[in-house]
Image (cartoon, rainbow, N blue to C red):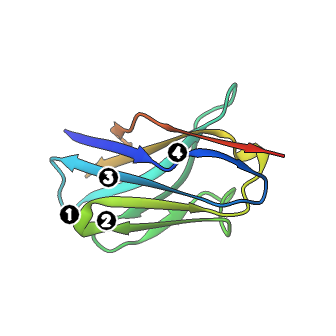
Amino acid sequence: QVHLVESGGGSVQAGASLRLSCAASGRTNNELVMGWSRQAPGKEREFLAAITMDYGTPKYADSVKGRFTISRDNAKKTVYLQMNNLQPEDTATYYCVARIGTVQYDYWGQGTQVTVSP
């Protein structure tokens, strides 16, 4: 079992930046992949980015390429999401996700709210 704890959400104005953090604990190994997903009210859940914790290989959804950057500290089993030039459409609950040796993300954090006002 892997436990994920997010932090760093908040309320900002359009154009601002935020950095989300997520720390993993429990039964992790070198196959750990961590990432971020979000869900806005009335919308489908959207994958944003992921990174392999061993080699740090990132992957992004097209919708956030160039604005969001994922990074990790493997020693701390922590992943970060730097979000720049936030817009009202980025308002959502952001979830940390993780998988180990599977295709689907089996582990989810409790979510952190990001609200962007015009």
Nearer mark to the viewer, of 3 and 4: 3
Q: Taking 91 as reference, is 101 left or right?
A: left
Kind of residue at badge 2: Met
- Give the crowd class for mark 3: few <14, some 14-19, many >=20 residues within 10 Å: some
Question: Decide: marks 2, 1 in contact (CB < 8 A)?
Answer: yes
Q: Residues within 10 Å of mark 1 (few under 14, many from 20)?
A: few
- Name the mark nearer the viewer: 3 or 1: 3
Give the residue number, with chain letter if any, for mark 1.
30
- Residue at 31 percent of width and 65 percent of height: 53
- Give the residue type that dot 1 points to: Asn
- The label shown at residue 114 is none
Res 37 label: 4
From mark 2 to mark 4, how far is it between C-alphas? 17 Å
Alpha-carbon span between mark 2 and mark 1: 7 Å
Give whichever of discs 3 and 1 has the lower sequence position: 3
Residue hosting label 2: 53
For the question of whether residue 53 can be seen, the reply is: yes
Residue type of the residue flagged with mark 4 = Ser
Q: Position of residue 86 (x, y in %)?
A: 72, 55
Earlier residue among tags 2 and 3 = 3
Where is 118 relative to 57, above or below?
A: above
Image quarter hosting the N terminus: top left
Alpha carbon separation for disc pair 1 and 4: 21 Å
Disc 3 element = strand
Q: Is residue 83 left or right of residue 99?
A: right
Closer to the camera in the image, 89 or 11: 11
84 shown above or below 37: below
Work out whether residue 103 can be spotted. Answer: no
Image quadrant in which you'd find residue 83: bottom right
Measured along the vertical axis of the image, is residue 46 above or below residue 73? Answer: above
Judging by the rendered image, the residue that carries numbered circle 3 is 23
- The CA span between labels 3 and 1 is 15 Å
